[in-house]
Amino acid sequence: MLTTKAQNNTKIAFIMLGILAVAGVLSVGTNAFAQNTAKTDNSGLDRVIAKTENWNGRYDISVSSFLKNIGKSTGIYKMIHRPSAEEIAAEELAKEAEEYAMTHAEDSFAAEAPGWQYVLMIAVGFLIVYLGAVKGFEPLLLIPIGFGTILVNIPGAGMGEGPDGMLHIIYSAGVGNEFFPMLIFMGIGAMTDFGPLIANPKTALLGAAAQLGVFVTLFGVALMNMIPGLNTDYTILQACAIAIIGGADGPTSIYVSGKLAPELMAVIAVAAYSYMALVPVIQPPIMKLLTSKKERLIRMDQLRPVSKTERILFPMLLLVLTILLLPPAAPLIGMLAFGNFVKQCGVVDRLSKTMENELMNIVSILLSLGVGSQMTPEKIINFKSIGIIVLGLLAFCVATAGGVLVAKFMNLFLPKGKKINPLIGAAGVSAVPMAARVVNKVGQAEDPSNFLLMNAMGPNVSGVIGTAVAAGVFIATYAH
């Protein structure tokens, strides 16, 4: 009896500490964003997020404005309120001007890097190849990224120079736009089984909880901008692109950075894929720190069988909800739904096999080479890139912790015998299926007969959807 009471007190204390921690983060973040209010018309946002002072208050920290903008970005609103031809033309001109300024800004300092920096980047390329080939860290991705880094930094080779350089052509054809990430998501859809999520829908909350790392990192970016001497000066667009690393989804990270901060795409992509590869190293200590041995020993019921009808309807329902509520996420979720529907409908096996095998392999090679082509000195050797590595790790750790803590919180309301093993919350990051395998491995370290893999796949695949939704929110709010 005393043990049960002590455990309940521990849970209550744990929840209170969690609430205080969240409140503290929000308080610090709010204070950081709210400083210097008297000196500016946009609530001091330009103090910690650079280059926002002329944006006419569009990016003020305002809950009402945020909800209003999200409402205007829904498919329902856009179906009712269609923009005029003049508004569309003005938006296109603004985008062209921004792209032109960005391109020429990069060109203006591209030749300023000294020769030793190119040698250093070639060495970094060989290191990436070593990590992939020898250490086995995401070899399918890191090996081509490493070779792309080596090739683009060879003096006089011109492989990354336009218009005829091979790597430049690859980047322009599919990496600098949404083409290759969309094809990757189509392949992911064809490879994904949503059955565990359909069988146990409440695990979707764990995939959503893991997105806490994405949003907490926004405050981390603001705080890093305030550190004297770093001169990072991340913009709000760059902050969003960095934060999405917490979702542990490489294609989504590339997609968001391409939309919001293409100048940071290379280091964001490398950070995202590197942390995905390091899931077996990063996650277990966090999982063990936040759970007790008793919690890690929790056994979960075997998942119910999922009918073919449910499997076919799920991607269609997911697509319809995206169309109605969050169209900016439709490119990612739409291709995911398309690939999964092709897999589940069972009448086009040739297409399904092509998506998950040949096409996926080809696009992965081209995408990785294109990402490597952006690993040039002027984009990598600076404090901003170091900050991205640090913030990406923060995002990943918080995402892992968020999933575990929400699982523990859910257990307070679940009846005995229906408890969730909190370890599966760590699979809420969308490193499919590696995160689920790590959960299963940690669980079996406590009890070799406890198989958590299928239960962990629920939050794992929901994390893919959650990260795409977070990306859609960022794009809907700031990509204007």
Image (tube, rainbow, N blue to C red):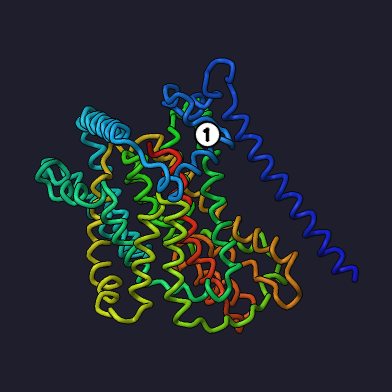
Residue 200 left/right relative to 474: right
State the quadrant of the C terminus. top left
Q: Is 249 on the left or on the right of 411, as rendered?
A: left
Q: Residue at x 45, y 64 (%)?
A: 318
Rendering coords of residue 372 (x, y %): 26, 50
Q: Please tell me which residue lies in front, 91 or 456.
A: 91
Against 135, is 329 above or below? Answer: above
Determine the residue positioned at 19% across, 50% down.
Answer: 173
- Of 284 and 435, the residue lying toward us: 435
Examine the rendered structure and indicate whether residue 129 appears above or below residue 421. Answer: above
Q: Quadrant of residue 139?
A: bottom left
When the figure is inspected, residue 75 is found, relative to residue 350, above or below; the finding is: above
Dot 1: few (<14), some (14–19), or many (≥20) neighbours within 10 Å?
Answer: many
What residue did someone put label 1 on? 222
Q: Residue furthest front?
A: 80
How many marks the image carries: the answer is 1
Q: Amino acid at mark 1?
A: Ala
Residue 203: image quadrant is bottom right
Give the answer, above or below, for where 461 lies relative to 33: below
Quarter of the image that includes the N terminus? bottom right
Q: Position of residue 104 (x, y in %)?
A: 22, 30
Q: Secondary structure beneath disc 1?
A: helix
- Tell me if residue 350 can be seen: yes
Q: Is residue 470 left or right of residue 480?
A: right
